[in-house]
Amino acid sequence: MMISLKKTVLGVLFACSLCLSSFAQDSVSTDDLQFTEIPADAVDTTTIAVDTTVKQATASSSVKQQPATAASNNEGSFWEIFLTGFVGGFAALLMPCIFPMLPLTVSFFTKGAEKGKAFSRASLYGFFIIVIYVVLGLLVTVIFGADALNSLSTNGIFNFLFFLLLVVFAASFFGAFELTLPSSWVNKMDANADKGGIAGLFFMAGTLALVSFSCTGPIIGTLLVQAATTGALLGPAVGMFGFSLALAIPFALFALFPSVMSKLPKSGGWLNSVKVVLGFLELAFALKFLSNVDLAYHWEWFDREIFLALWIVIFTMMGIYLFGKIRFSHDSEVAFISVPRLFMAIVVLAFTVYLVPGMWGAPLKSVSAFLPPQETQDFDLYTASLIGGSINSVNTADTVPHKYADKFQAPLKLNAYFDYQEGIEQAKKLNKPVLIDFTGHACVNCRKMEANVWPDQEVYKLISQDYVLIQLYVDDKSELAAADVVVTPEGRKLNTIGKKWSDLQARKFQSNSQPFYVLLNPKTETMLVTPQGADYEVSNYKKFLESGLAAFKAK
């Protein structure tokens, strides 16, 4: 597939960030993954109640019985996490804490040693670097546990803490302070590195990890946060493997080809510039976590315009910095602009210009996954003109206020329901199939689908005219009314909207990932076709909707 120039330019920009390149993944909700009977006063038991015997058998196995799409999404997430870590490792390599150590370390291996022996020692050194960082990733999983990692992506408190953490990391890169580990740790590790042999190489790798922490700490921290919030059990370990692999490869390669070392650029002020650029990217990335909190708790102050305004300012300042017009405390004076720095400045400022139309509602499809939903835009010239007058004509058919309509807004002015039973009853009246969209405020793939796939005229027509759309937010923190609260047999209350719909998705459809699209026959509440997750090919999603419609008409 040919990649457009726009996406290529944006790809170059975000390749500099260890996190933005992989944030777009299916979110996972594990709020109360218990398959329990819901009382009749909350949801009609004739539609979703499960026999106690069957329920107990399902409860122990349903989480494992994921649809094929969920399994493939998890595999894709691992690859994205790995690539994120790999890019982050190369970014760390260009930090002033590591880059100057590269020739010194390689010369230690090559001095007075045969080429083969030097390569084997450097390779073993790189292997120990990988072991140290992968163990660090595994420790994150062991300490927090799989369930805790899964819940991080939708937990408001954790998302806010992540926002503050990334702001601290950005400040560190800007030179406000340095994140350092206790000097006693470094000294003890360095002393053991003098032992020689395999143990000495291991402690040398450990010394590198400790000494370079002031530069790599923010990158590692951001990577672990991102990997943890994907919900993948081994996400942190996979991310650390990618990071450490990128960090270790140069040591082995330069030991094998030491003459190439002379062609490396000299250390200098450009290393600090790398830190500052990453600081700007950390700051931009942090805003996504703040947006997640705002959406989940319905604060409704951090909307799309404010998010874009901050991004425009951040990337404008980055471009000005690359031109040498802004200097931080640890920066040296920029006597002239190098060609790579000029090209990078052009890309950053071009990206900034690309963001500006978003202030008036432009979809900005290349970064739509990172932005707050389009419906939070106060001044939106895009949605109203998207499909001419068909938007308004479609939605005038149902003027009755929907349940929870005061809390949610459907994308693209679609006539969506936000309560399962209400949507089912309406579908029965209209004799139309149901499209259930299990979504979430923190689900970036949900936003990407809504911005890139749903606006297609044929897809939009199918959703708006041929289906009854039910959007169920599995990570919403709004308290349920007393009559809607679900009490499990263990006495635990599902007292929020998100918990209620997360339980419904896991119990009825054996899935806990978002987005998750289910085509349902409202009369029997049986699935028309196999559910699916995110699919950015418009033709594939159209076929999915058409197959469900055909199955409904055939019955």
Image (spheres, rainbow, N blue to C red):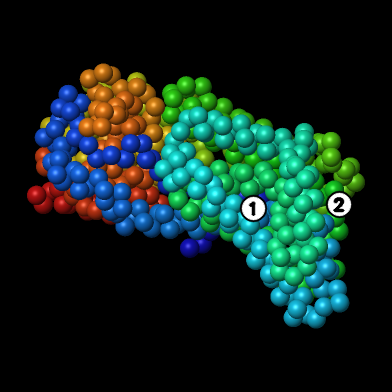
- Label 1 neighbourhood size at 10 Å, few (<14), some (14-19), many (20+)? many
Query: Which of the marked residues, 1 or 2, is nearer the chain's N terminus?
Result: 1
Q: Quadrant of residue 177?
A: top right
At 45% from the left and 57% from the top, the residue drawn is 76
Q: Which mark is residue 268?
A: 2
**Residue 519 is at least partly visible in this image:** no
Residue that appears at 34% across and 55% down: 69
Residue 228 shows in this picture: yes
- Tell me the tag on residue 88: 1
Q: Give the residue drawn at x 37%, y 24%.
A: 478
Res. 250 mark: none
Residue at the left extreme?
555
- Seen from the viewer's position, the closer of residues 297 and 379 is 297
x and y percentages locating residue 58 in the rendered image: 22, 47
Mark 2 closeness class: few <14, some 14–19, many ≥20 residues within 10 Å: few
Residue at far top of view: 482
Q: Amino acid at mark 1?
A: Gly
Q: Position of residue 57 (x, y in %)?
A: 20, 48
Total numbered badges shown on the rendered structure = 2
Quick check: marks 1 and 2 in contact, CB under 8 Å? no
The secondary structure type at the circle numbered 2 is loop
The spot of residue 526 in percent (x, y) is 16, 46
Q: Where is residue 141 shown, x and y percent of the image?
A: 50, 48
| Residue 124: quarter of image | bottom right
Quadrant assignment, res 67: bottom left
Q: CA distance from mark 1 to mark 2?
A: 21 Å
Three-letter code, disc 2: Gly
